[in-house]
Amino acid sequence: VVAVSRELGLPVKLIGVGEGIDDLRDFDPESFVDGLLGIGAAGGTGKSGEGKALAGRLQELRKARDERAKARKSEKSQVPAVATVGAGSGGPA
């Protein structure tokens, strides 16, 4: 799913969880990853500690991703404006 989306440059809107049209669900990337890893509500209720360890690590990674995105957004908003002086600006020649 992710590879096809990246290759075609298209977002994933729906995902099939069965064989019929009624089995289409809105695509939620975080739930999808949780399901692949067997953690969270999408992953069932495994009793192994491995699921909890994966869930904790995934939470850390998501937090770091969100912090990086916030920092990039903050950096972009702090870029100083550059004044350009062109010909005919009325300045000294």
Image (spheres, grey):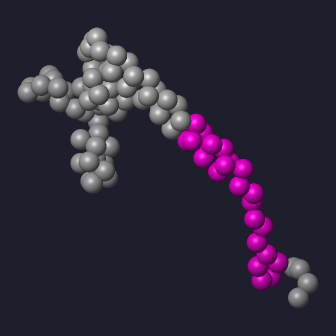
Residue 48 against residue 56 in the figure, above or below: above
Q: Nearer the viewer, residue 51 or 17?
A: 51
Q: Name the residue at 76% across, 79% down.
A: 86
Q: Name the residue at 53% across, 36% down.
A: 64
Q: Quadrant of the N terminus?
A: top left
From this viewpoint, is residue 77 visible? yes
Q: Quadrant of the C terminus?
A: bottom right
Residue 19 against residue 2 in the figure, above or below: above
Q: Position of residue 73 (x, y in %)?
A: 61, 45
Q: Position of residue 8 (x, y in %)?
A: 27, 53
From this viewpoint, is residue 26 visible? no
Q: Which quadrant holds residue 11?
A: top left
Q: Is residue 57 left or right of residue 24?
A: right
Q: Name the residue at 34% across, 16% down.
A: 49
Q: Is residue 40 magenta?
A: no
Q: Is residue 25 left or right of residue 78?
A: left
Q: Position of residue 4 (x, y in %)?
A: 24, 48
Q: Name the residue at 42% across, 29% down.
A: 58
Q: Which residues are magenta?
A: 67-89
Q: Which quadrant holds residue 46?
A: top left
Residue 43 against residue 73 in the figure, above or below: above
